[in-house]
Image (cartoon, helix red, strand yellow):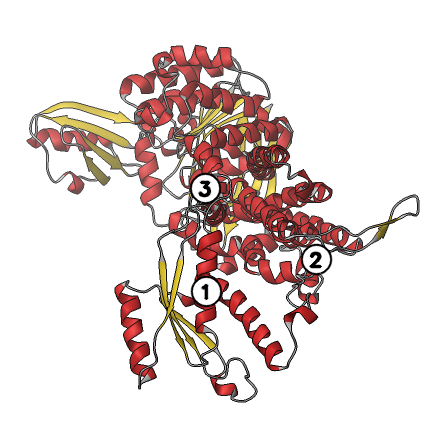
Amino acid sequence: MYKVLRLTIREYLAAVKTKGFIIGLLLAPVLMSGGLIASILLKDHVDIREQKIAIIDESAQMGDFLVMAADQRNESGLLDPESGEQIKPAYTLYTVTLSDDLTTLMNDLSDQVRAGDLHAFIHVESSVVQPSLDPENSHINYHAESASLDDVRDWIRGVANDQLRRLRLANAGISEEQVPDLFNWDWITAKGLLSMDESGQIMDAETSNEMQAILAPIGMVFLMFMMAMMGAMPQLSSVMEEKTQRIAEVLLGSITPFQFMLGKILGGLAVALTSTIVYVGGGIIFMNLRGLESYIPYDVLPWFIVNSILLIFMLGAILTSLGSVANDAKDAQSLSFPAMMPMMVPMFVLFPVLKEPLSSFATWLSLIPPFTPMVMILRLSTPVSIPAWQPWAGLFGVIIFTLFVVWGGSRIFRSAILMQGVPLKFSNIIRWMTKG
Amino acid sequence: MNAISLTNITKTFADFKAVDDLSLSVPAGSIYGFIGPNGSGKTTTIRMIMNIFHPDSGLIQVFGESRNDSHTDRIGYLPEERGLYKKMKVRELLQFYGALKSGHSVTADVDRWLERFDLTEWANKKVEALSKGMSQKVQFIATVVTKPELVILDEPFSGLDPVNTNNLLEAILELQQNGATIIFSTHDMSTAEKVCDYIFMIHKGKKVLDGTLNEIQEKYGNDTLRIRAEHKITDLKSLPGVEKVHDFGQVQELRISQGADHQNILATLLKTNRLISFELMKPSLHDIFVRIADAKEVSDV
C-alpha cells in the first residue's frame, strides 16, 4: 500500500503544483457558468435610449390606448425609486394613418426600423376585440429586428390584453366595477408535498422555486463534471506519455501494473477532491453569506460525494487503460470521446431529466451504471422525492460496474502498457481484457 | 546458490516466439552478460525475470523461490529505454524512485551517488535539462540507490562516453564486491569480455552460448589467425584451410578450418610478403557473436 500511496502523492503533486491546475481551478467555474454570471453582471446594464414604436390600428380601438399607456409608463416607471436615476428606456408610441395599401405602409415602416429611426411597429388587426367575427384578422403583430426577445413586446402583451378584456366586457354591457378582481392574475404557486414528522405532526409543504428546481441540480451535475474533468480525464494523456516515454517500464520494475493503475486513479481522485473542497466549501460559504443557505441540498451531499468518487474511479480505470493502449496523442484524442460518454450522455439529457425526474426514461437511465452517478444526483437534487430504493440500487450497480471496469482495465493496462506501436484496434482491447 | 534460475521458459507474442524453451542459471554474486542480436529475446527474458511479462510456460526462480511480487524490491532494474519524468527535479526523481522501490527514504544514498557521478550541482535541475549521458547516469543511480541484491541492466552503457563508461563499470564492480549479482545486456563485446564472469547469448529466442569466456572460446579452439603485414595482403581467402577473412584495415583475421596447418599458412604468406605479426588465437567474443548471428541456421549449444 505504501507504494500505491507514494505514487498517488507524486501524481497529486505533479497535478496541483502546476500553474495550469490553479488557473483551471479558478477558470473552470467561470467558463461553466459564464452565461449566468454575465447575465447577473449585465442585469443592470439596460439600454435606456428612447424606443419609438409606430402603431397601425385597423381596429380603431387599441392605438390611442397603447399610446396613453406608454405615456403613463414613461411618467411613472422609468426611474429608480431610491437613486432617482433612469433605469428603463422610454417607449414613445404613436399611431400612423392607414393609407390605401397596408403592405406598402408596413414595408416603409420596416425600412425605418432597419434604418434605426424606429425601434418597432405594431399592427393591430381589425377584429382583435371580437376574434370570433373574423378569426383571420384578430391578432396583434409586433414587428422588430429581434421581435421574439424584445422587452417592449412583453410590456405590450400585458397592457394590450388587459385593454382587450375591458373592451369585451364593455361590449357585453358589464362595467369593470362589477368584477373588481377580473384582472387579478394568479401565477399558481409551486409547492412540494406535505409530510409527517417524527411526532406525527403534518408538516406544511414548502414552496419551491426555480433556484431549487434548476440551479441546485445543474450546479451539482456541473460540479461532478468538473471533478471528472480534473481528476480522471488527464489520466489518458498522462498514461500515454508514461508509456511512450518509457517511464512505465521503470515503474513496473518497482510496482505491479495494478498498483501503478491504482496509484494513478487515486492521484486523480485526490486532485478532484481538492477541487471539490474548494468549490463545495466556497459555494457553502457564499450561499451562507448571501442568506441562501436554504438552497443548499445538504441531504444530497453525501450521495454526491460517494457517486463522484465512484465516477472518478470508473472513469479513471477506463482512461488509464485506454491511455495504455494509445501510442501517440492522435490515438489518445480518438479514444477520449468514447471514454467521456459516461459524462456526456447525462449532460445531453440534463433538461429532460430535470423536467421529469420520475419518468421511466430518467429512472432507467439513472440505473444504467455508467450514467448512474450524474443522472442519479441530478434526480436527487430536484425537489421531487425519488423512491428511496433507487439511489441504493444505483449505487450497488455502480460499485459492481466500477469493480468490473477496474478488473478489465487493469488487464488491458497490464498487457498494453509495454506494447509499442501495436495498432489501436477494438479487437486488441477486447483480447487484452478477456485474455489478459 | 543461484540468484536466478530459468527452466524451460517460453514466451510467445501472437505468432512470434520471442523466447523458446530457455533454461539458464545465474550464480549469486556473479556478473552475467546477456548478448544477442537485436530482437533475439534478451529484453523479453529480462522482463520475465522482472515479472513484467509472465512466461507462457516454464519456471522462473529468484533467490531460490518461485518468482513473485515480493522479490521486486530486491531487484534493481535499468530498462533498455530510459524512462525519467522530464518535469521532475533530479533529486526529487531519485528519491521518488528509491522510495517506490525500497519503501523508505533514500535521501542520503541519493546524495552519495549524485556526488559519485559528479551530478550534485544538477540535483535541483529538472531532468529535461540533462544531457543524454547525464540522464543515463541518473537512470543508473535510480536502479542501484536502494542497494538491490540483484541488479539487471539492459544496455547500461549506451549514450556514455569512455570516461563515464569506466565510471559505470567501476560502480558495477563495486556492487558485485558488495555481494550483488549483476546481469547486464550489451552489444559491446569487449566490455562483456572484460567484465563478465559468465556470458549468455540468445538468438532467435534460443540459448546459443552459455558459460565463462574461456569455456565458450574453448568450444571453438585456436581457429583464428591475426596477421599484420607491411603491405596489405590480398587474396587471403585462397590460402589452404582459410574459411573466412575479416579485413580490419591494419589487421586481418582469418578463420581456419579444423585440422588446417597454420604453419603451412605462415610459410605460404612469407614467400611473397613481409609480416609484422602473425598470431594464432582463440576467436574473440565479437567474432563468435558474428559467426552465430550471421549463420542461417542456429542449433542449440
Type of residue at label 1? Met
Q: Is residue A373 visible?
A: yes
Label 1: chain letter: A
Q: Which image quarter is the N terminus of chain B in? A: top right
Q: How packed is label 3: few (under 14 Cα within 10 Å), some, or many (20 or more)?
A: few
Name the foreground residue: B182 vs A319: A319
Type of residue at label 2? Ala
Tell if the residue under mark 1 belongs to the same chain as the one under mark 3: yes
* Residue bearing the label numbered 1: A68
Q: Residue at x 34, y 80 (%)?
A: A98
Disc sitting over residue A84 in the figure:
3
Query: Residue A96 is drawn in which quadrant?
Result: bottom left
Tell me residue A122's x, y (percent).
Answer: 41, 72
Tell if the residue under mark 2 belongs to the same chain as the one under mark 3: yes
Mark 2 secondary-structure assignment: loop
Q: CA distance from mark 2 to mark 1?
A: 36 Å
Residue at the limit of the structure toward the bottom, as seen here: A133
* Residue bearing the label numbered 2: A190
Mark 2 vs 1: CB contact within 8 A: no
Judged by depth in the image, the label closer to the viewer, 2 or 1, is: 1
Numbered disc total: 3
Q: CA distance from mark 1 to mark 3?
A: 23 Å
Tell me residue B118's x, y (percent).
Answer: 34, 12
Q: Residue A414, relative to residue A401: is it above or below?
A: above
Q: How packed is label 2: few (under 14 Cα within 10 Å), some, or many (20 or more)?
A: few
Label located before the other in sequence (1 or 3)? 1
Tell me residue A280's x, y (percent).
Answer: 61, 37
Judged by depth in the image, the label closer to the viewer, 1 or 3, is: 1
Q: Is residue B207 visible?
A: no
Q: Residue at x 59, y 50 (%)?
A: A218
